[in-house]
Amino acid sequence: YGDIPPLKSVTPYPLGVATSATKVSDPAWSALAARQFSRLTAEWEMKMEYVLQADGSLKLDRADKMVAFARRNGMTVHGHTLIWYAQDGEYFQKLSAKPDAFLNAYVDYIAGVMGRYKGVIPSWDVVNEPIWNDGRGLRPCLWQKVLGDDYIGLALEAAHRADPQALLFINDYNLELTPKKRATFLKLIETLLKNGAPLHGIGTQTHIDAGITPGLIRSAIADIASLGLKVHISELDISLREDHPTPVAQPRIDQVRTLNELLEAYQDVPANQRYGLTMWALRDSDSWLNTPQGGKSLIPDEPVLFDRLGRPKPLAQ
Ligand code: XIL
């Protein structure tokens, strides 16, 4: 496929790909990823579950490996993710009865991870998935329990102190599928901005189904962009699975239509707000939707741009 221009040369914004650290040493994966994509995100190895040890020390060996791969190949890195309701860990659980020590550890964690890559990783998802799926408000989590609702503002301030140059994002999902969730999420962001929080961008994960109702993506992107911050389509995959609420009639045709709607809507976002588009896997066989923990069942899915042999699918054209 040497004569087909790489995708990263076709999009007028950075094109990212997420991966586990093991793949970067797989020659087939790394050649294709480096040719087609200009940005790299760690699927798991920069998350607290991997990084934070029970004694409070940080394990960044795999993050280092991914950053080195990206630099060797002229790719940038988007950091994912510092604070997430789904991961807290023994170290923080033990401190939860001592709010002062907890807050110090919280700030130190953010400073430790970001500080290591200061000047190297230019952007971070500081807080991931803060809103309940039905949009009723903030999700309860250890961070909120100990630090209060302002755990998000505190994380952003700590991140900004750790690397004042870094672009700081808040990231969430189903923002297109559930307008109420989007409204709550955007309200949270407006409040943070009003209070002077250092927040530069919004990540919309965009884990969607091929058969998503036409128009939902377009209104989501326009709404999110209306706040004037950078917009990152941060974890794109378009599932062909038919086990979702609306039956997918012609999965592959719908998938192309849905991707087109997304690309067109993103094209309408002012260029200086388009932070880029990140695919949440390189090949279908790399996708979390084809692993038991990610999917609801084990029906094989084809949610990304390259097939299991690394060939571009019609979706990528
Ligand atoms: C997923 C990864 O893809 C998996 O490999 C990992 O086991 C669990 O997390 N929203 C997010 C991502 O913000 O971090 C998730 O990634 C997918 C959903």
Image (cartoon, rainbow, N blue to C red):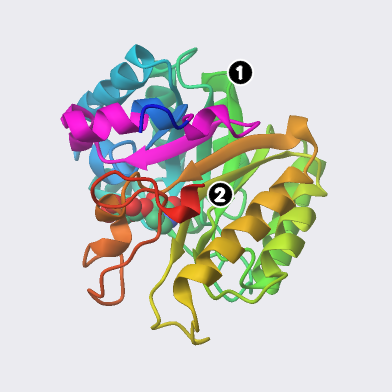
- Mark yes or no: residue 142 visible: no
**Residue drawn 17% across and 28% down?**
25
Q: Is residue 20 magenta?
A: yes
Seen from the viewer's position, the closer of residues 261 and 229 is: 261
Residue 240: x %, y % from top left: 41, 71
Earlier in the chain: of badge 1 and badge 2, it is 1
Which secondary structure, mark 1? Answer: loop
Which range of residues does the magenta coloring cover? 5-33
Q: Where is 186 relative to 244, above or below?
A: above
Residue assigned mark 2: 171
Q: Where is 97 relative to 213, above or below?
A: above
Instruction: Judge: label 2 CB < 8 Å from ligand 1.
Output: yes
Which secondary structure, mark 2? Answer: strand
Q: Is residue 316 left or right of residue 177?
A: left
> Which residue, as the protein is rendered here, is positioned at the far front?
3
Q: Label 1, label 2: how many angstroms apart (C-alpha)?
A: 19 Å
Identify the mark at residue 164; answer none if there is no mark: 1
Residue 214: x %, y % from top left: 68, 73
- Mark yes or no: residue 140 visible: yes
The amino acid sitting under disc 2 is: Asn
Residue 144: x %, y % from top left: 51, 56
**Residue drawn 40% across and 54% down?**
304
Mark 1 crowd level (few <14, some 14–19, many ≥20, 10 Å Cα): some
Query: In the picture, which quadrant includes the N terminus?
Result: top left
Q: Quadrant of residue 81?
A: top left
Seen from the viewer's position, the closer of residues 281 and 187 is: 281
The amino acid sitting under disc 1 is: Pro
Residue 204: x %, y % from top left: 59, 52
Q: Where is 221 relative to 37, above or below?
A: below
**Residue drawn 55% across and 56% down?**
172
Q: Nearer the viewer, mark 1 or mark 2?
A: 2
Instruction: Judge: label 1 CB < 8 Å from ligand 1.
Output: no
